[in-house]
Amino acid sequence: MSVSIVQYFGEQTNKCGYCSGTNCSKSHGMHAYRLACEDYQDLIDRGWRRCGNYCYKPQNDKTCCPCYTIKCDALEFKLSKSNKRILRRMNKFLRDGKREPNEQAHSPGQPKNGDGDDVDVSGSANESQPQLPDKKPSVLNVEHVEDLVQAHVEQIKTTNTIQVSGDPSASLLANNKIKTLAPNLNPPRKKAKQMRIERRQAKLGVPHEQPQPQPKIQEKTLKDFLSAPKETDKHQLKLRLVNVDGEEFKRTLPQSFELYQKYQIVIHHDPPKNMKAYQEHLQHSPLKHKKIDDLPNVGYGSFHQQYWLDTKLIAVGVIDILPGSVSSVYFFYDPDYSFLSLGTYGSLREIDLVQTLAERVPALKYYYMGFYIHSCPKMRYKGKLSASYLLCPETYVWFPLTDEIRSKLDAKKYQRLNPDATAKDVNEFLNQHLNDVMLLINPQTCINYGRFIQKDDDDVDRDVIIEYSKLVGRVCAQRMLYVNMS
């Protein structure tokens, strides 16, 4: 049994990494000691995101640069012309080992002359790393607390079990369905010339020829472009998916850290971080690796997808694999290979991973790209993938990212997105649910809020717990453990 254990830090105000404004980035934050993969899936479906063990949720109606959670339906994804050019460029490089003539003078992070559609801003525009709060989380023995919670749940499970059947708000996946437009039931109108010909043929008694259906040209799919390498290829590109707690990750840590430093210096012009900062940002994760029968060699948890060109590590995609999605955390690459548009190429490979996993786990069909920040032009690239959806920050329902929504965001940077003014959050936490929130009041005591206030209400801030519970939603508020220790 994996139990989510979190400590809520409340509202945070920091410098914005997008507009560079001072004290204008508003969010709520919490430290996650442990997160069940199912709980984190529910949290990102409410606008939360993690950086290491720190989880944050932007206050979109107050912050300077509203951040809308964005995802792509990998099974509905279609390649654009730009996507295809990038895939062909990579395949040609692997086959021949040569760069295209107009690539020879291309500098890392700079647009290529005459090829604006292929500018790979995704590799140089990762989301800004949130500033961690000054407050330090309480020190906990996580394994001991998990055992404590399990004993507590066993003791009261007959009265504290969430009944999914009959309670529509208990299942987010059942209620946050994507709204699609009704199909066009009206057949297309014939052209006037064709109608005149048919009328003339009818008068003469000449049967008109029925138009023969044109055979559809089968477009190449993403998997077609990512076909198996040939022995005659000049280079071999191999992808390895390694768990952040596994031995293979530890063995290749020196290479990935060196690559990260090079990326930070050349692409972002930042001073190199030390090993500890790198691990806190991109290795440490509250997600506990969970093996499942349908994905015996993968499972759920946090991973690095490594891109090995022959024997050299040239890129790393940091991802979380969850029950309903693959969530992209970060991506970094060797600037010497910027001509391959590795940022976009990495996104396409991660979509391919989702498509592959969905063959075994049909519900796992979404690719989460983090936040779409329309008010920051360099972060709009995430909206270029087809079949993309934005999360309404008030009702937590998904809507297709259309030109209409873009126009609304042009006019006003914060939008509810859900046009139904009467729609409400189906997973809303109400004060009547407060008694079921689990509290850790000391390293040895786990108790529900309702029982705790009967004994002692001096050491608990009711309003703060309600604020936290509304942000994470009723299901997670009643399932996760809230650390209430000073």
Image: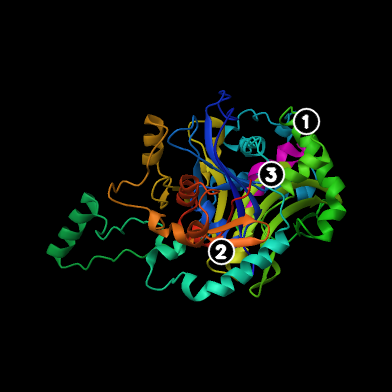
Which amino acid, by three-letter code, is at mark 1? Ile
In three-dimensional space, the C-alpha distance between marks 3 and 1, rounded to whole angstroms, equals 15 Å
Give the crowd class for mark 1: few <14, some 14-19, many >=20 residues within 10 Å: some
- Image quarter in which the C terminus is found: top right
Which amino acid, by three-letter code, is at mark 2? Leu
Tell me which segment is drawn in magenta.
333-348
Tell me the colour scheme of the image.
Answer: rainbow
User: Residue at point 12% right, 63% down?
Assistant: 203
Tell me the SS state at disc 3.
strand
Which of the numbered marks, if any, corresponds to residue 364? 2
Residue at the disc numbered 1? 265
Placement of 302 over or under 257, stated as above or below: below
x, y percent for residue 52: 68, 47
Please report whichever mark, 1 or 2, sits nearer to the chain's N-terminal start. Answer: 1
Residue at the disc numbered 3? 331
Q: Are marks 3 and 2 in contact (CB under 8 Å)?
A: no
Classify residue 168 by image quadrant: bottom left
- Relative side of 160 to 95, left or right: left
Report if residue 78 is visible in the image. Answer: no
Report if residue 169 is visible in the image. Answer: yes
Placement of 144 over or under 270, stated as above or below: below
Placement of 64 over or under 406, stated as above or below: above
